[in-house]
Image (spheres, rainbow, N blue to C red):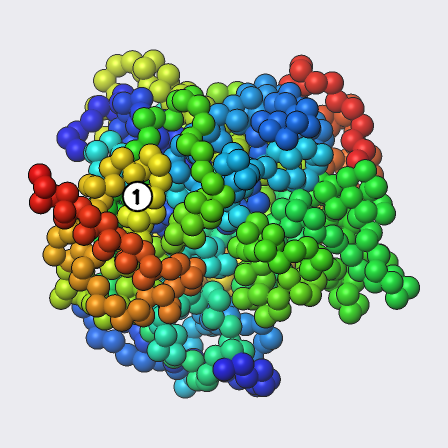
Amino acid sequence: MAEVSLKKKVIVVGGGLAGLMAVIKLAEAGYHVDLFSIVPVKRSHSACAQGGMNAAVNTKGEGDSPQIHFEETLYGGDYLANQALVKGMCEKAPHYIDMLDRMGVPFNRTPEGLLDFRRFGGTKFHRTAFSGATTGQQLLYALDEQVRRFEVEGKVRKFEGWEFLSTIMDDKQVCRGIVAMNLNNMEVQAFKSGAVILATGGCGLIYGRSTNSVACTGSAAGAVYQQGVHYANGEFIQVHPTAIPGKDKNRLMSESARGDGGRVWTYKNGERWYFLEEMYPDYGNLVPRDIATRAIFKVCREMNLGIDGEDQVYLDVSHLPHDFLMERLGGILHIYEKFVGEDPTKVPMKIFPSVHYSMGGIYIDQNHMTNVQGLLAAGECDYQYHGANRLGANSLLSCFYGGEVSAKTAGEYLSGLEGDVDAEVSKLAGQQVKKEQDANERLLTLRGKENPYVIWEEMADWMTKNVTVVRNNKDLEKTEQKLKELQERYKQVNVSDVSEWMNQPLQFTRQLGNMISIAQAIVKGALLRNESRGSHYKPEFPKRDDKNFLKTTLASYTPEGPVITYEEVDTSLVKPKERKY
Amino acid sequence: MNQTIKREDIEIKIKRQEGPNSPARWETFSLKYRPGMNVISCLMEIRKKPQTKEGMKTTPVCWEQNCLEEVCGACTMVINGRVRQSCTALVDKLEHPLRIEPMSKFPLVRDLVVNRSSMFESLKKVKAWVPVDGTYDLGPGPRMSPKEAQYRYELSKCMTCGCCLEACPQYNPQSAFIGPAAISQAVLFNAHPTGKRNASERTRSLMVSGGAQDCGNAQNCVQVCPQNIPLTQSIAEMNRDITKELFGFLKE
């Protein structure tokens, strides 16, 4: 590719669904795109999404509509989401299903050959299109294939095996490109562009074992946060009710298992107790995730009714027909069998809640621009759409819509750029590269006594214990102190490998520093939000408090710790009401 | 197989190599057994305390990983002589001591990491995509029976993990054979109502030396595919298409 003017060039960081969607929209509109990803994009975390993607198409005559989808998404999120973007997303959803269908996604079909839809949490409609129980993988592959086509046509350049380190910013806090590290030869390089879209995913690794992939450290978000980008609603972390606990990660057992008829139970007085059905007769096993998770915690931790006295309850699909299960849920049932060694079509699965998704993330406006001009964000790494709790099968949808909106905004922004942008940027780029090289050098020569993986494990244990399902201010304060201690110990880290060739511990140590900064924003936001809303539950403040907290939390970085301010939530379309399932 | 005896310690032998041009060596590690361990969690333990069984300090082992639930394809290795994903390699079900090596058919990067970019290049060669007009609002896709959708779904699960190439006797650095994964992807897109329109291009890309006819029918690929993709069936399918294409070609 010949040298392209920065006014025609966009960098996308992250090759999951949101990133790839942005790439496709930009390439179609005639922009040149450089796509950066830690892993080959086909291996991105979007592949882990299982149950499906929501679109209110009403093919089953139930009276569903995008407006109802919109209202249920707001209600499920306890009204913390800004409403205009959510409305846009729900209206566009049926179009994305058509688009993916045309791209050849092998969605499950009805006998007539139309797309089939299944049920998911927080709704009574069949609204979720699906490919067995590996929908994310199939959608990711569809976009990966289209991007490969653009790559062949010379419209997209892929940089796989590169880690984003920081943005190049001019003295007016305008983003002019990125600095990234080649994960093979560890070289640090500048890449200039008119605009940058971050689509770097969630931050589950802050909690150690979650349902997230290993790449989901939140490191890129942490890096730009330290460069002055706001981090919003960090305290809203979704804990999914049904996962298999593991030594290396927790593995998700999709909500679609319940959507297709699975039931959650434990023993009480020697008999099966379908506690979700009893507690929530209206929605039963398909109450939203925050509610199901709290119920499982109550059963296991307060009532001590976990199976075998441990932190686990049954998720049961064994009463459903074998062929039906294999066709619709084969993907996850195989995962269960491979890792637990039992056949879930015959015996109930043992599950427990696990950290799963971050509703919070990089602050963006209604056009997906961050508070830094030229820097945009989309997908799980941004904070819009899901409020205080995400409804199942809305995450894939928000990737498509966020990717599309951010690509559109980036294009408009580029056409408004004035002056000789190309000439200005070169010097800035050199300075930022030097800064990052120095940071690597410092870490490699430290030879301290702290192992980065041990620091990580301690952070993860504290975060999981104190900043998940049930939160108390006393514990949050202690966690805040603990993170300060870890931040100090991080300064004495020993990378344990000084190689200049594929130095994975160096890569991880850099990520760890950024993870600690995001963890601090999460904890501070949780500490100051004295109410209960969606996934954020404080027994000391059991009610939602709209007067004081119907607000977006904005964390700004300072070396002494995050400074929190609040912004009003746009509730102009639907008036908040009490959330009662 | 299936030994669930509790062990005090487990022993793991890992083939190490600092870089493509460095000599290989074996290192042995000893870890405390915990129930539910897989190969990945062993490697994670080692990096917390990178020290061999003999007490020598070493560097953490490099390996590729991402989803850890066998849908991303990253963590392929050769474990006890068999190529597979290391996330689903459960310590309780493996013979001890464990022997872990990188795949041998791809250029080595470091330790257990190899470069599989040739597999993604192959997907370009066979045009593994549906050539849509664009992502604009152009209405729904073609109707399809549940049976057709199910058939395509099975093929579409390919993670580009490399197991089939590692196990294939025809695929090696000296041969041009493209391997089962890309052939099966060509079949996947030839089976789509829109993809069918340029089926002939895909088929012709596999009529060259190194194409589908270089398959030696050892059938190792289906044995090792972690997604149980009917790879040999795909290759047979493609050979049939090639024959048809050949007749058409002769008519021209």
Name the residue rendered at 43%, 73% in the picture: B50
- The amino acid on which the numbered mark 1 sits, given as a three-letter code, is Asn
Name the residue rendered at 28%, 64% in the picture: B165
Query: A9 or A418: nearer the eye?
Result: A9
- The spot of residue A492 in percent (x, y) is 47, 59
Label 1 secondary element: helix
Task: Write down the quadrant of residue A435 in the picture.
Answer: top left
Q: Is residue B111 visible?
A: no
Task: Count how many numbered circles sit on residues in the image.
Answer: 1
Query: A204 or B145: nearer the eye?
Result: B145
Name the residue rendered at 35%, 52% in the picture: A440
Q: Quadrant of the N terminus of chain A?
A: top left
**Residue B104 vertical position relative to residue A116 in the rendered view, above or below:** below
The residue carrying mark 1 is B190
Query: B16 or A243: nearer the eye?
Result: A243
- The spot of residue A106 in percent (x, y) is 45, 42
Name the residue rendered at 53%, 35% in the picture: A112
